[in-house]
Amino acid sequence: MSSPSKRREMDLMKLMMSDYKVEMINDGMQEFYVDFHGPIDSPYHGSVWRIRVELPDAYPYKSPSIGFINKIYHPNVDEMSGSVCLDVINQTWSPMFDLVNVFEVFLPQLLLYPNPSDPLNGEAAALMMRDRAAYEQRVKEYCEKYAKPEDIGAGPEEKSSDEELSDNESDSSDDQVAGKADP
């Protein structure tokens, strides 16, 4: 069995090789951001969230900490902190899982199948149970306001660099992309 640090390295490389945009926070491999796209067939489709991932020293034996950086309207995500209420990550984590599972299975399932009976965002849960159409409309409003691909800096395929420079919000997006080299 390999050491936790080797496993951390291997899982991180596997995530990067799976075409996820990964940005390291520090020099180590324990904290990083991953750009996560909303799943097809959900009101989140077409939107992008920056997810902060922290790997504990005991990873993979202890689950990663996962949080949304930009706002998302969802019953199982705390609107202010971005914390995720996800049973597989928080309680039933197993060393058999890896980081790719988090982004290809667990988070898409969370967005496709919210659980309003175990909410971190009570307002979203109540609206979802009371009026599904109004809930989905609110989700789309949040996506438009907080999760546009160009706001994350994840949209080179959707916007050219020249178009990004002409955005009215270029001052705020400059802070997010400072220090990154274009490929």
Image: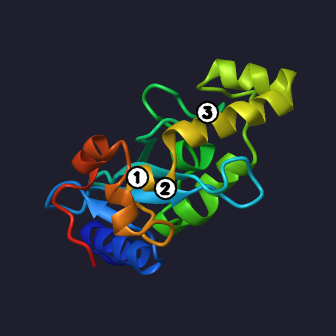
Q: CA distance from mark 1 to mark 3?
A: 17 Å
* Front residue (pair 20, 136): 136
The three-letter code of the residue at mark 3 reads: Tyr
Q: Nearer the viewer, mark 1 or mark 3?
A: 1
Q: Looking at the rendered structure, which numbered label has been put on residue 53?
A: none
The three-letter code of the residue at mark 1 reads: Ile
Q: Which residue is mark 1?
A: 152
Which residue is found at the position 62% from the left and 57% from the top?
46
Q: Are marks 1 and 2 in contact (CB under 8 Å)?
A: yes
The three-letter code of the residue at mark 2 reads: Pro
Estimate the x, y position of residue 78 in percent, counting from the top left: 52, 28
* Front residue (pair 7, 114): 114
Q: Is residue 51 visible?
A: yes
Q: In terms of sequence position, does the residue under pointer 1 or pointer 3 come before the other?
A: 3
Estimate the x, y position of residue 85 in percent, counting from the top left: 57, 36
Which residue is found at the position 42% from the left and 81% from the top?
17
Q: Nearer the viewer, mark 2 or mark 3?
A: 2
Tag 3's secondary structure? loop
Q: Which residue is mark 2?
A: 149
